Image (cartoon, grey):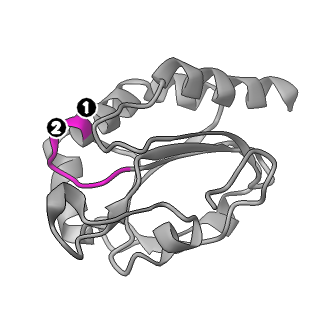
Amino acid sequence: MPLETGQQAPDFELYDGQGNLTKLSEMTGKPVVIAFFPAAFTGVCEKELCTFRDSMSRFNDVDAAVLGISVDSRFANAAFAAANNIEFPILSDHDRSTIKAWDLVFPDLAGMSGYDVARRSVYVLDADGKVAWCWLSDSPGDEPPYEEVMKATESLAQTN
């Protein structure tokens, strides 16, 4: 069952496009927004990550980190980030260990048997790494409620 509000987020160690290792457990002390998305260079994923990119000043105002996670290789994620001027880390869960640990596997994307990707979802973690807010979709074509993500993140800054 996917994580729910109040639960501790499972740790992960994933590489960004430049080969830097990101450990969730090292990001305590501030809010963290994690956007799991199915695939780089697809329309809805591009729109979603670019919307987060365009909201970075608001995230920065509350000292929140933003991460994107897909099963694409770190090389594909680097190209995707560069093509869209995305400066927050986009992490590669190429072995699918994180989407399995978080119970976010979306099987057989676009009818491609065995091509399991991340279920589109957004988690806002508090400074202790607990889920403060989450949104999950059963359709890779859905977009998250961006303003709700912002409000959840901003509310964490107001409680500190």
The amino acid sitting under disc 2 is Gly
Magenta-highlighted residues:
37-44
Q: How many angstroms separate mark 1 from mark 2 (CA)?
A: 6 Å
The amino acid sitting under disc 1 is Lys
Report helix, strand or loop for mark 2: helix
Would residue 31 be seen by someone viewing this image from the given angle?
Answer: yes
Report x, y in % for residue 22.
51, 68
Quadrant in the rendering for residue 110: bottom left
Report helix, strand or loop for mark 1: helix
38 falls in the magenta region: yes
Q: Is residue 81 left or right of residue 28?
A: left
Relative depth, front residue between 39 and 106: 106
Write down the residue under mark 2. 43
Relative depth, front residue between 39 and 26: 39
- Residue appearing at x 21%, y 53% in the figure: 40
Report x, y in % for residue 61.
60, 25
**CB atoms of marks 1 and 2 within 8 Å:** yes
Quadrant in the rendering for residue 47: top left
Considering the image in quadrants, where does the N terminus appear?
bottom right
Q: Residues within 10 Å of mark 1 (few under 14, many from 20)?
A: some
* Vertical relation: 51 (above or below) 117: above
Q: Is residue 137 left or right of residue 23?
A: left
Write down the residue under mark 1. 47
Q: Is residue 12 left or right of residue 14?
A: right
Considering the image in quadrants, where does the C terminus appear?
top right
Secondary structure, magenta segment, majority class: loop
Quadrant in the rendering for residue 11: bottom right
Numbered label attached to residue 114: none
- Residue appearing at x 36%, y 50% in the figure: 37
Report x, y in % for residue 59.
55, 30
